[in-house]
Amino acid sequence: MSVASNLKPYLEQKAALIEAELLESLPGIWNIPDELRESMMYSLMAGGKRLRPILVLATVEALKGSTESALPVACAVEMIHTYSLIHDDLPAMDNDDYRRGKLTNHKVYGEAMAILAGDALLTHAFYSIVQSYRAYDVPAEQIVEIIEDLSKLSGAPGMVGGQAADMLGEQGITGLEQLEYIHLHKTSDLIVFSLKAGGHLAGATPKQLQALEKFGQHIGLAFQIQDDILDLVGDEQKLGKPVKSDEKQQKVTYPYFVGIEASQEKVAELTEQGKQAIMNAGFPYPDRLLELADYLTQRDH
Amino acid sequence: MSVASNLKPYLEQKAALIEAELLESLPGIWNIPDELRESMMYSLMAGGKRLRPILVLATVEALKGSTESALPVACAVEMIHTYSLIHDDLPAMDNDDYRRGKLTNHKVYGEAMAILAGDALLTHAFYSIVQSYRAYDVPAEQIVEIIEDLSKLSGAPGMVGGQAADMLGEQGITGLEQLEYIHLHKTSDLIVFSLKAGGHLAGATPKQLQALEKFGQHIGLAFQIQDDILDLVGDEQKLGKPVKSDEKQQKVTYPYFVGIEASQEKVAELTEQGKQAIMNAGFPYPDRLLELADYLTQRDH
């Protein structure tokens, strides 16, 4: 992996910052049934690289904005990501018993509670975004922009649409276009949201917002193709899940259509195009975003 | 039933207005998998009295506000209510095959799609609220207030918390206090949201918002106790579901603790207290809200 030498401590530091904020994100004074609170926090604090919230913060930094006031929005992305994993793992969906080496939510708390914990995390993401307004005086107009973006990019025309298409596609994906639709919405859209939210918070120009969208779509797709590749050739221990699980479920992946080599070329090409978009949009400090693009698309786990 | 003579046409007219808006609420140009769109619309358009959105509009009218600009918010409440029914009906939850005389969502579209349709409707509610800002220039600050209220009142400390407590309570509710917690959150909170959202949209004073909250909590609880009563003594055809279904599932209800007669007295008392709160808060046109309180708590189905 060609990770920039100082990226690893950066990722660790930001992940720690986000996890500290996530721990405080569900007000202790709220009267919530214990088991619901535990179920929500079990999955929210189950680890993971916190890549999406880090993208929010990195975008804010690329524009010299305030990281602190972006933290509630960064947490919101992680809540959306977490709820989608909880619901995805349910028996009626992917029926997974383990996630990141730990039992999935419904294996610990039961299906009904897992459904409710997912619903509650989804809903709480919007509460968290509003806290950037309450605690840090982010203007209401920016909050509304961010909320509109999230409702689209994580909803029916976004992530949920991608998941629905993925599920329906298990009955037979007929071509690359259909597969790209799934990847674009299931994976890229939440990455695009993370970047655009950072942009809104730090006063990005319309041109910069467009560049962030293109960057997100490209590295999101590259990230997912890389995931497909790793699922075929990766190392089981590094991934924390059985290799070839997609193949076993007879899922059609990118390499299925074009082979491993052309898939790897596609990843490189998408990454390069995404980075170009950022480089051409006049960000004061674009370097971290560019490093993250390489990190996301060259990872081996 | 002592329904004010002109309330019935009012309810029908408002329900028609809301249904017309709901039909248009999922933009046709959005690229959404057909089956996801159908599944969302199947439950959204499955009838029902549209009581919660009507409460939004009635509150706006009580304050001489603009009904038109409140419609997207009214639709949002119905989306939240609908998603909660879809998820509640799932096999892992209440396992219901019928709702309002029609097959439940998962019986038609399968469990996975029903989970996703619920997630998508929940998410889309927030998009819908933002449309009051986009289309009707409702100030961003009011939109943020409404979104914060919805995220709390329909989330972990609100409706979802009530559902979790209800589910956990199936293993044995020990007292009235626990039952009231469930009713307050599972039922009242979304009614409170509807009223407060109407208040925010029409410029309610803090005193009026407080009165709306008290009114909502009281008539919500009365509504739910009435539901418990009807479930014991109601007419199967009018209710559209088997009578005593709660008893069959050995659910503890209000009459279980205090008997039918004391439950009926409690309904009357709560309704009166709720109405008093409205009458004391200086609404220009409170009459419709007061009529709705009687309608909700005196219904026989």
Image: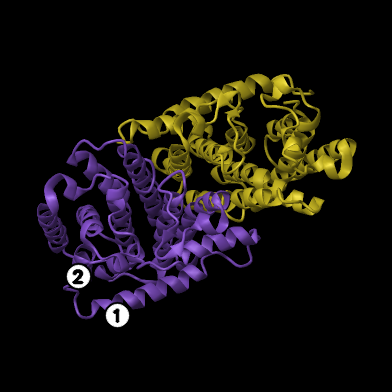
Chain colours: A purple, B yellow
Of residues A249 and B137, the one drawn nearer to the viewer in this rendering: A249
In the image, residue B293 lies at what x, y percent? 73, 34
Judging from the image, mark 2 belongs to the subunit labelled A
The crowding category of the residue bearing disc 1, from other C-alpha atoms within 10 Å (few below 14, some 14 to 19, many at least 20), is: few
Can residue A209 be seen from the camera position used here? no
Can residue B63 be seen from the camera position used here? yes
Q: Which residue is drawn at 52% across and 25% down?
A: B17
Residues beneath discs 1 and 2 located on the same chain: yes
Q: Residue at x 35, y 78 (%)?
A: A13
Judging from the image, mark 1 belongs to the subunit labelled A
Residue type at mark 1: give it.
Answer: Pro
Q: Quadrant of residue B23?
A: top left
Residue type at mark 2: give it.
Answer: Glu
Secondary element at image label 2:
helix
Q: In which quarter of the image is residue B50?
A: top right
**From the viewer's perspective, is A3 left or right of B182?**
left
Q: How many labels does the image show?
A: 2
Of residues A257 and A80, the one drawn nearer to the viewer in this rendering: A257
In the image, residue A192 lies at what x, y percent? 28, 54
**From the viewer's perspective, is A46 left or right of A189?**
right
- What is the distance, in whole Å, between disc 1 and disc 2 at their CAs? 13 Å
Q: Is residue A125 above or below residue A165?
A: below
* Mark closest to the chain's N terminus, 1 or 2: 1
Q: Which residue is drawn at 25% across and 38% down?
A: A173
| Quarter the N terminus of chain B occupies | top right
In the image, residue A90 lies at what x, y percent? 46, 49
Of residues B234 and B113, the one drawn nearer to the viewer in this rendering: B113
Residue corresponding to mark 1: A9
Residue corresponding to mark 2: A291
| Quarter the C terminus of chain B occupies | top right
